Image (cartoon, rainbow, N blue to C red):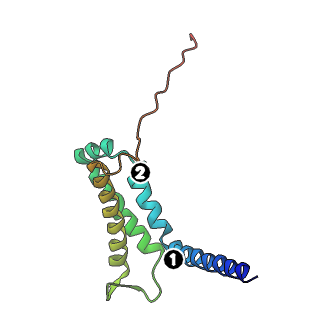
Amino acid sequence: MELLLSLWNVVVALAAVVVALVQFLIPWIPLIAWVAFWLLAVNWKKLYPILMRGGILGVVLTGLMVIAIWSLISSPAGGSHFMYGLQVSNVVGKTVYVTSLTVIAMLCGSVQLSGCCDAYCKLEEAHVEEVSHGH
């Protein structure tokens, strides 16, 4: 009976560890998904030349538009953000958030271009055959 009680205590302790781990990871799921997308789903070997030919301007303009709209739609409680021990305005806070996400995406691209995740990223194009019906 003592053995069964000990095994039950182990199961309860493992369940408590799993619950604590899930509670710790839940707030980080959007950032983990962001990194996984930019690291594993985007073919940076094709995207990088496009960015260098002027596509980065589209990224910057999209970021500015996101900052403007997001700062108008959603203002924090109290009207300002508290980040890194500073109290900053709504627009500055949103600028920090959008810039951070953009930098994280670019860092994921540099990691993929360095070849660190070639074993996990098999980014091959699907070949689609055109069917002609004789029309």
Secondary structure category for the residue under label 1: helix
Query: Is 61 on the left-hand or right-hand side of 130?
Result: left
Residue 94 lies, in percent from the top left, at: 37, 74
| Residue on which disc 1 sits | 24
Q: Is residue 53 above or below residue 75?
A: above
| 98 vs 111, nearest the viewer | 111
Q: Is residue 92 above or below residue 112?
A: below
**Residue type pointed to by label 2:** Leu
Q: Which mark is residue 40?
A: 2
Q: Which mark is residue 73?
A: none
Query: Which residue is rendered at x = 41% and y = 48% of the image?
Result: 120
Of labels 1 and 2, earlier in sequence is 1
Image quadrant in which the N terminus is located: bottom right
Query: Is 17 on the left-hand or right-hand side of 60?
Result: right
Mark 1 and 2 residues: CB-CB less than 8 Å, in contact? no
Image quadrant in which the C terminus is located: top right
Q: Quadrant of residue 101?
A: bottom left
Secondary structure category for the residue under label 2: helix
Q: Quadrant of residue 125?
A: top left
